[in-house]
Image: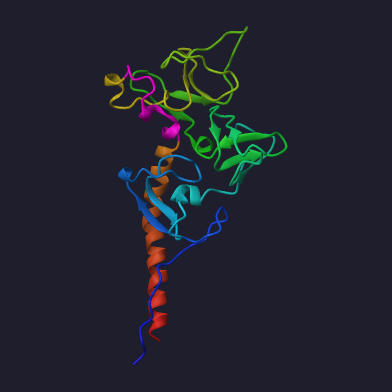
Amino acid sequence: MASKKTVNRPSVRHPSHNHPFRLFKARDEDEIICSGCELDLTGQAFKCTKKDCDYFLHKSCFDLPREINHKSHPDHPITLLYSPPYDHQSYECDACGEYGTGFTYNCSECKYDVHVGCAFIPETVEREDHKHPLILLYKIPCKDGKMYVCDVCEEEVSENLWTYYCKECDYVTHVHSCAALDEDDEEEDEEENRESSSAASRMKSFMEAEDEMAAMKLESRMKRAANNDIIYSIR
């Protein structure tokens, strides 16, 4: 009778990290940060198999395309880098103006960098308190030296950063937390710096949609791999 061998859980590799990964279901209470987009880890994810290595990736970050053509930078494609290409090991996102130390979409020729989350935000969004859709602009339409102020947080909007804009009403918002109206916004307007309005919202909807579609396919593939290992071990 053939002896049964211990079957290891299937693992996968990613070029951003030296160690293998295994499938991981992230819960909100885990409070883990994705090593790629540097946002809260949610939903389907991968974790490093090494016990003392705190390297995690969203499923959507794991599957990011290596190169994309983006409307914000039409002259050149932008390439996925797993760490900033600069000596100071950080970069300033040309979309939202915030700094990053994780993955970036980069144009080396122009020194143009975009957070991986910013690269996939929707071209239109809706706010319940505004009657028209807001259109994503990669450069604010400043005329005659006019300065724009965000109609949500009432802070200045940089003309060099992306915004959401309604031309009909001349209504503008910052590209992330100000663009979306959460159910609890009306109750929490006084909390200007509350955590839920941080940059952590910039890729949440994109990741949830991608993860939901990919979860069943991914689990099926890994189960098949595990079943093949069992069959092989008892032959």
The quarter of the picture where residue 100 lies is: top right
As for residue 190 lying within the magenta part, the answer is yes
Check the image and name the residue furthest to the right.
109
Would you identify the image quadrant in which residue 233 lies?
Answer: bottom left
Q: In this view, does 17 lie above or below 206?
A: below
Judge from the rendering whether residue 176 lies leftward or rightward of residue 70; answer left or right. left
> Which residue is found at the position 62% from the left and 8% from the top?
145
Image quadrant for the C terminus? bottom left
User: Which residues are drawn in magenta?
Assistant: 189-202
* Quarter that holds the N terminus: bottom left
Task: Tell me how many marks there are.
Answer: 0
Residue 185 in the figure: left or right of residue 176: left
Residue at image point 58% right, 8% down: 146
Tell me what residue is drawn at x 41 percent, y 76 percent: 229
Residue 62: where, in percent of width, then height? Answer: 49, 51
Query: Vertically, is 73 above or below 80?
Result: above
Q: Is residue 51 above or below residue 60?
A: below
Left or right: residue 189 compared with residue 85: left
Position in image of residue 187 (x %, y %): 26, 20
Q: Is residue 184 magenta?
A: no
Colour mapping: rainbow
Q: Which of 179 and 166 is in front in this view?
A: 179
The percent position of residue 224, horizontal first and vertical second, equals: 39, 69
Residue 206, x across and y down, in percent: 43, 40
Q: In this view, does 9 lie above or below 65?
A: below
